Image: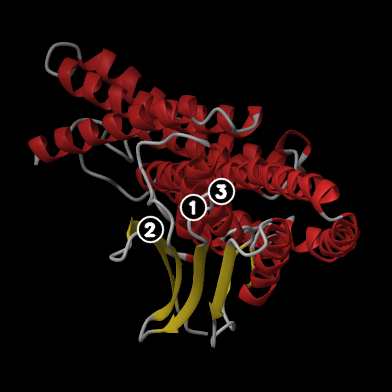
Amino acid sequence: MEWLNSLAYAAAILFGVFGLILSYIARDLDRWPRRLCIAIFSTAVASAALEVLAGSVYPFSPPFYWVINLVNTLTPPLSSLLVFAYFLDCCGEDFRRSKVMRVLWALGAAMAVAGIAAKLSGEVDAAPGGAVRIGFWLVLSLLLSLMIAAVCFAALIRRRKKLTNVQRVMFCVCFLASAWLEVILVELYLMAGLVRRYLEQKEETVRQRTQVAVLQMRPHFIHNTLMSIYYLCAQDPQKAQQVILDFSRYLQSNFTAIAQEGTIPFSEELEHTRAYLAVEQARYQGHLFVEFDTPNTFFRIPALTLQPIVENAVKHGLDPDLEPLYVTVTTEDTDNGVRLTVEDTGPGYAPSDADAPHFALDNIRERLKTMCGGTLEIEPREAGGTKVTIFVPRHEK
């Protein structure tokens, strides 16, 4: 059994040290929660270390062993009090001004005194493997321990609405468990909090990146549209006026949708694209032809998904000195979702190019993956040109 005790103490020291490391890593913790976690784990390490030290010195110096053992009698109530202080902090209360905390400190001090008296009176033989004799001090120590647990449970029931479900379960077990199990539970809770905050930060980073991506593409779209109007002013002023009117209505009705953080109905994105193409077709009369075959528009995609792809096809595929450019936009239902395809008859897509439209395509791919689990593939078209395929999975309600 001696080796089992040694293994338990070694595990307690290991858990305590790991908990201390977690407490220092969790830089986003407030000052007092971190201090309480450090105190809880330090108490566990000190208690286990004292047990190991006491066991190693017992054969050589029994009096020193007794002193260490008596000192270690203070650690169980101290650990319980620290966990309760952490509980109050999780409830949003200042444990330093809590009346319940003061009652527990009094009960904990009385329990420590009763525990020391039980050992000094011989009711508890502090020697390794020593016997236990029922006596006044031992009974008092057990009663005080039960009173501490009862006060803790009463406080937990009264403040249960201030805690999450995970916190309720954790503290409920902590108030019933031994000091060692308290340390493990607090450590697991701290670790889960670190993982949760890491995932939240990662999600926030991705969300900010997608917002930046949209902001990067929006000026690009507006710039190209205004340049198209600029050329129309010289070629056909009357048509330029109509295009300006259409474009102003487009901006007024659709900027709200573009600024949305989540996905939008595909029908709105389709209107974005039609508005853009109306301007480009007015500019390049007889050189740009567009065909829409979109029987299914009842799905959602990130804003500015289709329009930049079509813009990319027009910018890289249209040349007034060459043959007209044909762009086809189709949607097709599949068993698992919707397939959106954009094909053009231009010169083809070169992945090695590093200009803005290709950068926009990379942003679209990332936003599709993050916001709706979609994919984007770019490949050469069999008859020449480029084919861009977007797949949006169907999400069951």
Give the image location of residue 306, x and y in percent.
Answer: 57, 63
In screen coordinates, is 16 left or right of 113?
left
Which residue lies at the image location 55% right of the left edge and 76% below the top edge? Answer: 291
Give the image location of residue 168, x and y in percent.
Answer: 56, 61
In screen coordinates, is 278 left or right of 4?
right
Task: Kindly indicate the quadrant of the structure image that contains residue 118.
Answer: top left
Closer to the camera: disc 1 or disc 2? 1
- Confirm whether residue 175 shows in the render: no
Closer to the camera: disc 3 or disc 1? 1
Find numbered disc 3 in the image and state the secondary structure of the residue it sits on: helix
In this figure, which residue is indicated by the disc labeled 2? 385
In this figure, which residue is indicated by the disc labeled 3? 315
Alpha carbon of mark 1 to alpha carbon of mark 2: how far?
14 Å
Give the image location of residue 177, x and y in percent.
Answer: 41, 53
Q: Sequence-wise, which precedes: disc 3 or disc 2? A: 3
Few, some or many residues within 10 Å of mark 1 (<14, 14–19, 20+): few
Task: Kindly indicate the quadrant of the structure image that contains residue 219.
Answer: top right
Q: Are marks 1 and 2 in contact (CB under 8 Å)?
A: no
Q: Is residue 328 above or below residue 244?
A: below
Between 98 and 283, the one nearer to me in the picture: 283
Residue type at mark 1?
Leu
Alpha carbon of mark 3 to alpha carbon of mark 2: how far?
13 Å
In this figure, which residue is indicated by the disc labeled 1? 322
Residue type at mark 2?
Gly
Which residue lies at the image location 48% right of the left edge and 41% below the top edge? Answer: 194
Hey, which residue is sitting farthest front in the picture?
321
Q: Are marks 3 and 1 in contact (CB under 8 Å)?
A: no
